Image (tube, rainbow, N blue to C red):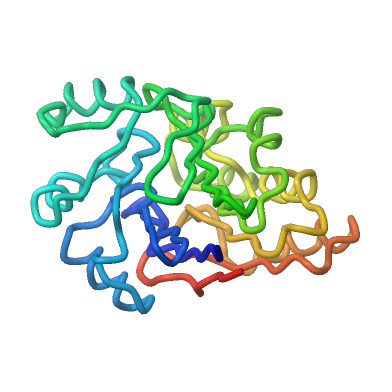
């Protein structure tokens, strides 16, 4: 039962990732309009008929902007934990949607996919990452917003064949940016966003013979460069003897390349 993955877009303007088994597919987050989500799926060679649910990592708008229209237009089930649902309700009344509530650390099923949500540190109400697996043991992981890489995050991602991980910023670019100090503190803090160096150290720690592909996600437009993020991760993996692991970028305005087992 082969898994495939495509990051439809990642960045402060929107985040959405498709993970599928061939018979079941899910969207992790829905940060684009319904029309744009359909367009990006088609760009990746997919249709909405391949999507059977939407799983939300946290309540921030760049991860949730399209949930209402995706549910109404395509009757897609929506999954989130109670903290995220409560936060969305306080923001825009989304509690009225027919949510299916999951509990962090407890796997749930959508078709033939097993989805395990796990807690991550970020400045949201109860944010999570996800590992999505199949019965034959195939696993992919996605964590796009986290201030630090915890032991729990690394444990969950270890053994995955493909991983989408945040590489938001270069720390020196953040420190030298023309931004308020309070914003810099938020980005660099334990509840903020992961740096290129943090992402590189994490993928080195979780890498093994089974890890095939790493996608670097949620790159800052102002405080990062694609080539810098790639070079940091590639150098760290090669130095640790993991030259077999492919590293790719994700983009705010177009889909990533598709990974398939």
- Towards the viewer: 180 or 141: 141
Q: Name the residue rendered at 26%, 23% in the picture.
A: 87
Number of on-image labels: 0
- Towards the viewer: 9 or 189: 9
Q: Residue 50, relative to residue 138: is it above or below? A: below
Judge from the rendering whether residue 81 lies leftward or rightward of residue 114; answer left or right: left
Q: How far from the left and from the top, in percent, is residue 134?
A: 55, 52
Residue 189 seen in the figure: yes
- Towards the viewer: 19 or 1: 1
Q: How far from the left and from the top, in percent, is residue 217?
A: 52, 55
Q: Name the residue rendered at 30%, 71% in the picture.
A: 40
Judge from the rendering whether residue 81 lies leftward or rightward of residue 72; answer left or right: right
Q: Name the residue rendered at 13%, 34% in the picture.
A: 97
Query: The N terminus is located in which quarter?
Result: bottom right
Residue 166 seen in the figure: no
Q: Name the residue rendered at 32%, 54% in the picture.
A: 14
Query: The C terminus is located in which quarter?
Result: bottom right
Q: How far from the left and from the top, in percent, is residue 89?
A: 17, 24
Judge from the rendering whether residue 75 lies leftward or rightward of residue 148; answer left or right: left
Judge from the rendering whether residue 46 lies leftward or rightward of residue 7; answer left or right: left
Q: How far from the left and from the top, in percent, is residue 132?
A: 52, 47
Q: Residue 243, relative to residue 78: is it above or below? A: below
Q: Residue 82, relative to residue 2: is it above or below? A: above
């Amino acid at each position: 039962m082969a898994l495939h993955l495509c990051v439809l877009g990642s960045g402060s303007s929107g985040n959405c990732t498709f993970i599928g088994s061939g018979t079941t597919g899910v969207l992790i987050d829905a940060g684009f309009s319904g029309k744009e989500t359909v367009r990006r799926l088609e760009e990746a060679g997919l249709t909405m008929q391949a999507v059977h649910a939407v799983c939300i990592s946290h309540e921030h708008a760049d991860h949730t902007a399209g949930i209402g229209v995706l549910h109404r237009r395509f009757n897609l089930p929506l999954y989130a934990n109670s903290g995220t649902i409560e936060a969305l309700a306080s923001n825009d009344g989304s509690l009225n949607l027919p949510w299916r509530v999951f509990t962090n650390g407890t796997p749930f099923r959508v078709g033939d996919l097993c989805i395990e949500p796990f807690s991550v540190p970020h400045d949201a109400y109860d944010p999570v990452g996800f590992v999505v697996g199949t019965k034959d043991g195939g696993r992919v992981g996605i964590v796009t917003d986290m201030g630090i890489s915890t032991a729990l995050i690394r444990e969950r991602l270890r053994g995955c064949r493909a991983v989408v991980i945040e590489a938001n910023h270069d720390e020196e670019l953040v420190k030298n940016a023309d931004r308020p100090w309070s914003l810099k503190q938020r980005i660099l803090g334990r509840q903020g966003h992961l740096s290129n160096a943090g992402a590189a150290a994490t993928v080195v720690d979780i890498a093994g013979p089974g890890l095939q592909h790493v996608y670097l996600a949620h790159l800052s437009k102002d405080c990062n460069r694609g080539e810098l993020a790639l070079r940091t991760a590639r150098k760290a993996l090669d130095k640790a003897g993991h030259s077999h692991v492919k590293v790719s970028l994700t983009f705010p305005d177009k889909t990533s390349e598709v990974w398939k087992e």
